[in-house]
Every structure is written in structure tokens, then in C-alpha cells.
């Protein structure tokens, strides 16, 4: 196993009294993530900064019942569920081995605010019932908006964790932004005072 990155000082600030749960999850992901096809071999030395805290710092943005599309290893969904026990999280993931991991971690961490659903986003049958939907490292916005927006109630919000190319993705997704009646589309930088590399979040209200 590649050595796990030392825990940054900001982790305890971001997670507060939930830091022990965050440590347990991060350790489990570092130990088992590569062998189970959840993370690549280069990730453990940057797991805290690049993945765990990059996800967790967005936690204050969420409320209500939130879907995480393509939850994978639990980034950001499980991390956010640890940070925000007052929010209801629905982790939507199609791959059976990832579903097994998510369920194991929900049990191991005692997270009673998480529901794991095995499905692709386009197979979601509950209609536009979620207050918010998030996703991280799933696909470009022109592909991601049609997968996520139909799950959100009118007046709800997309909060998508994106990379440095997000402005270009917005330009390329104008047709989808219009089709799904997204308004107040904007990019926010989160955690500039806590992280060396702040988290970029695309926010949009669903019409």
C-alpha cells in the first residue's frame, strides 16, 4: 500500500467533532481503495487534500435531501454525509462492487443519514424529488446536466464539484442549461482559507 498523506491541519477544522469518522473512512479508502478499483495507485499520498477535503469543504452548501450521482468510492457523497449528519444523502451508483463498498462504509461508520441506490442516474424512478444533486468527476457539464437536473425538484439546486475547466464546460453546455431551465448558473470557489487548492463548485437553480 502506498503511504497515506499526513492529515492536514484543516481537516479537524472542516470536520469538527466528526473528524474521527473522516479518519476512519480515509484510512479504509487508502488501505482498500486500489485493490477494489475505487482509486488509482497515485491517490493515497494526496488522498486527504485532493479528495477528502476537496469534497468536505463544500458541506455547508447542502440541505434537505441530496443525491450524489456516480458516487463511486463515496466522493463526495460519503464524505459529505460524514460532515453533515443533519442532511439526508442518496448515493446513486450503478456498479455492484462500488455499491458493496458504499454499504460496507455506511455500516462501519454508523451513518443513518445515507441511502444507497444501485442505478444509473437515467434509471432514477422517483422523479424530480431531490432538493439538491451533486456529482464529482463524473463527466462534462453538457453530459452531466441531463443526468442530474431531472432528479431535482423545481426550485432545487445543482451543486457540482468541478475542475479548472468549468468555465469552458459552461460555454459548451448552453443548450442543456436552456433545456433544463437552469438559472443563476455560477462558479464559486470554496475553502480558499482552508485548502491550498480551493474547491470549484458549479451552482445552478433548476426551473
Image (spheres, helix red, strand yellow):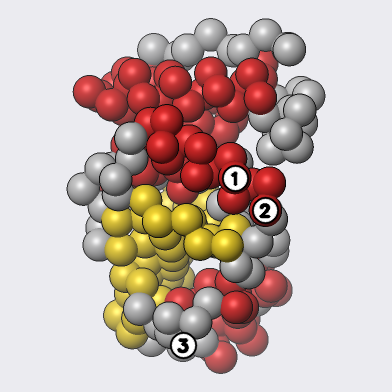
| Distance from the alpha carbon under mark 1 to that under mark 2 | 6 Å
At mark 1, the secondary structure is helix
| Distance from the alpha carbon under mark 1 to that under mark 3 | 35 Å
The image shows residue 105, relative to residue 137, as above or below, that is above
Disc 1 and disc 3 in contact, CB within 8 angstroms? no
Query: Nearer the N terminus, badge 1 or badge 3?
Result: 1
The image shows residue 20, relative to residue 146, as above or below, that is above
Residue beneath disc 3: 181
Query: Nearer the N terminus, badge 3 or badge 2?
Result: 2
**What's the residue at 59%, 45% (across, down)?**
100
Residue beneath disc 2: 96
**What's the residue at 73%, 34% (across, down)?**
36
**What's the residue at 33%, 40% (across, down)?**
111
| Residue 83, image x, y percentages | 32, 37
Q: Residues within 10 Å of mark 2 (few under 14, many from 20)?
A: few
At mark 2, the secondary structure is helix
In the figure, is residue 40 to the left or right of 132? Answer: right
Residue beneath disc 1: 100
In the figure, is residue 94 to the left or right of 23? Answer: right
**What's the residue at 53%, 8% (across, down)?**
6
At mark 3, the secondary structure is loop
| Residue 149, image x, y percentages | 49, 77
Classify the position of the N terminus by image quarter.
top right
Disc 1 and disc 2 in contact, CB within 8 angstroms? yes
Amino acid at each position: 500500500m502506498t503511504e497515506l498523506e499526513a492529515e492536514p491541519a484543516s481537516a479537524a477544522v472542516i470536520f469538527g467533532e466528526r473528524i474521527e469518522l473522516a479518519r476512519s473512512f480515509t484510512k479504509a479508502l487508502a488501505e482498500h481503495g486500489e485493490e477494489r478499483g475505487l482509486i488509482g495507485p497515485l491517490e493515497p499520498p494526496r488522498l486527504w487534500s485532493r479528495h477528502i477535503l476537496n469534497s468536505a469543504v463544500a458541506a455547508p452548501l447542502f440541505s434537505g435531501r441530496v443525491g450524489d450521482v456516480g458516487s463511486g468510492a463515496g466522493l463526495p457523497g460519503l464524505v459529505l454525509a460524514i460532515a453533515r449528519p443533519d442532511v439526508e444523502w442518496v448515493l446513486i451508483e450503478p456498479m455492484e462492487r462500488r455499491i458493496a463498498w458504499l454499504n460496507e462504509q455506511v455500516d462501519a461508520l454508523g451513518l443513518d443519514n445515507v441511502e444507497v441506490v444501485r442505478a444509473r442516474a437515467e434509471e432514477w424512478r422517483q422523479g424530480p424529488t431531490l432538493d439538491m444533486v451533486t456529482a464529482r468527476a463524473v463527466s462534462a457539464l453538457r453530459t452531466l446536466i441531463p443526468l442530474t437536473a431531472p432528479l431535482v425538484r423545481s426550485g432545487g439546486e445543482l451543486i457540482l464539484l468541478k475542475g479548472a475547466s468549468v468555465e469552458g464546460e459552461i460555454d459548451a453546455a448552453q443548450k442543456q442549461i436552456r433545456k433544463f431551465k437552469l438559472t443563476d448558473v455560477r462558479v464559486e470557489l470554496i475553502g480558499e482559507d482552508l485548502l491550498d487548492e480551493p474547491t470549484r463548485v458549479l451552482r445552478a437553480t433548476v426551473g
